[in-house]
Image: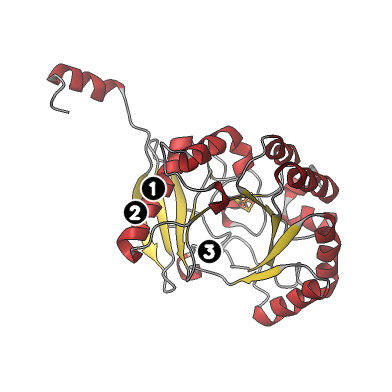
C-alpha cells in the first residue's frame, strides 16, 4: 500500500499479522480427489479435501487442530487437540479449495462439509461464524442447504442448533447403534448416549424441519453383522433420517479393515427391507490418505 507512509507501513508490519490459512501442499488422487495441507499463522497444520463427483464439487474442511474425542477408527483422533480454528481460518479453507476447484476442474464449489479434522460442535461459536460468512452476502453467498455439519454427537450442542433454527444440514457420525459397542469405538458416547442423541435429533428436526443424515462407517467384524444392522434399524426408526453407509478406510494407528462392498450391500439390504433411506458412499482419495477418517497431517 504505497499510498501509506513508509513509517506507517513499517509500524503495521511490526505490530499486526494476518491470521490467514495458507496452502502448504497438495496431493491429487487417482480419482481426482485433492487433499490439501493448510499452514496456519502459528505453524499448526490442518487438512482439507476437494471431492469432485459427477453432480457435485465438495469441499471438506477442518474445524480444529487435532481432536479431543479420540474415536478409535479415525486418524485425527490420534492427534492431540491443539486449538480451535478461528472463523477466518475455516473460511480460508473454503476459499482456497474453491480456487483449486476452478483451477483444476473449472467447476465452482457446490457443497461444503464440516467433516475434516476436529469436532465442529466443540468449536461452536467459530464454526457458526464461519458459516455466517460462507452464506452471507458479504462472503460467498452460498445457500446453507449446501452445507453439512457432521458431529460425533454432542447432545447439548445439537439442541442448541435446533434452538437457533439453523438452515444447514446436520449429520451424526453414528457407526454403532448399541451403547456398549459405540462407546468402545467412540468414547464420547459414554456421556452422550444413544437415547439422549435420538431425543436431541428429534428436537433438532422439530425446530428446523431438516432430516438428519446418519453416517455409518462399515468396519469389518466390528459393526457389520446382521445383528448390528438390526440395531441400526431400531435407532433409525426413532429419528427422521437417511443413512449413509461409508466404506471404511484403514489407518496406520489401528487394525480396523473395510468390510468390502459385498458385506456392505448385504448390510444395506437389511435397512432397505425396513424401508429406510440408504446410500452407499464409496471411498474417495484413499491412495493419498484423504478419505473419511484418514486425515492426520501426513504430508
Ligand atoms: S471422527 Fe471426528 S470427532 Fe472422532 S476423532 Fe475423528 S475428527 Fe474427532
Q: Is 156 left, or right, of 102 in this rendering? A: right
Query: Can residue 264 be seen here?
Result: yes
Query: Callout 3: 10 Å neighbours few (<14), some, many (20+)?
Result: many
Q: Mark 3 falls on what kind of element?
A: loop
Looking at mark 1, is its residue's CB closer than 8 Å to ligand 1? no
Mark pair 3, 1: CA separation: 21 Å
Q: Position of residue 247 (x, y in %)?
A: 63, 70
Q: Mark 1 falls on what kind of element?
A: helix
Query: Callout 2: 10 Å neighbours few (<14), some, many (20+)?
Result: some
Q: Looking at the image, is mark 3 or mark 2 nearer the viewer?
A: 2
The residue shown at (54%, 53%) is 146
The residue shown at (75%, 79%) is 266
Quadrant in which the C terminus is drawn: bottom left
- Residue matched to label 1: 95
Q: Is residue 273 above or below residue 146?
A: below
The residue shown at (78%, 52%) is 183
Asked which quadrant contains residue 180, the reply is: bottom right
- Residue matched to label 3: 291
Q: Looking at the image, is mark 3 or mark 1 nearer the viewer?
A: 1
Q: Position of residue 108 (x, y in %)?
A: 39, 58
Residue 99's tag is 2
Looking at mark 3, is its residue's CB closer than 8 Å to ligand 1? no
Mark pair 2, 1: CA separation: 6 Å
Q: Is residue 242 above or below residue 275?
A: above
Foreground residue among 257 and 179 = 179
Sequence-first disc among 3 and 2 = 2
- Would you say the residues marked 2 and 1 are in contact, meaning their CB atoms lie under 8 Å apart? yes
Q: Position of residue 220 (x, y in %)?
A: 71, 72
Q: Mark 2 falls on what kind of element?
A: helix
Amino acid at each position: 500500500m504505497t499510498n501509506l507512509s513508509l513509517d506507517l507501513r513499517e509500524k503495521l508490519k511490526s505490530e499486526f499479522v494476518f491470521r490467514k490459512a495458507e496452502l502448504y501442499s497438495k496431493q491429487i488422487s487417482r480419482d481426482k480427489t485433492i487433499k490439501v495441507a493448510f499452514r496456519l499463522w502459528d505453524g499448526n497444520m490442518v487438512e482439507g479435501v476437494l471431492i469432485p463427483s459427477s453432480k457435485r464439487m465438495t469441499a471438506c474442511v477442518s474445524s480444529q487442530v487435532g481432536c479431543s474425542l479420540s474415536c478409535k477408527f479415525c486418524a485425527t483422533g490420534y492427534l492431540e487437540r491443539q486449538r480451535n480454528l478461528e472463523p477466518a481460518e475455516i473460511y480460508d479453507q473454503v476459499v482456497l479449495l474453491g480456487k483449486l476447484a476452478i483451477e483444476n476442474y473449472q467447476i465452482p464449489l457446490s457443497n461444503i462439509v464440516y467433516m475434516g479434522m476436529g469436532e465442529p460442535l466443540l468449536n461452536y461459536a467459530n464454526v457458526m461464524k464461519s458459516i455466517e460468512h460462507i452464506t452471507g452476502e458479504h462472503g460467498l453467498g452460498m445457500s446453507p442447504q449446501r452445507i453439512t455439519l457432521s458431529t460425533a454427537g454432542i447432545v447439548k450442542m445439537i439442541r442448541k442448533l435446533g434452538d437457533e433454527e439453523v438452515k444447514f444440514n446436520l449429520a451424526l457420525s453414528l457407526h454403532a447403534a448399541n451403547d456398549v459397542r459405540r462407546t468402545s469405538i467412540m468414547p464420547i458416547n459414554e456421556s452422550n448416549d444413544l437415547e439422549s442423541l435420538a431425543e436431541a435429533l428429534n428436537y433438532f428436526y422439530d425446530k428446523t424441519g431438516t432430516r438428519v443424515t446418519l453416517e455409518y462407517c462399515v468396519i469389518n467384524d466390528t459393526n457389520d453383522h446382521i445383528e448390528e444392522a438390526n440395531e441400526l434399524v431400531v435407532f433409525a426408526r426413532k429419528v427422521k433420517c437417511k443413512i449413509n453407509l461409508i466404506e471404511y478406510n484403514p489407518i496406520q494407528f489401528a487394525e480396523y479393515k473395510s468390510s468390502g462392498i459385498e458385506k456392505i450391500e448385504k448390510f444395506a439390504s437389511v435397512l432397505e427391507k425396513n424401508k429406510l433411506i440408504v446410500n452407499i458412499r464409496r471411498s474417495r482419495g484413499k491412495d493419498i490418505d484423504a478419505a473419511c477418517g484418514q486425515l492426520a497431517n501426513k504430508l
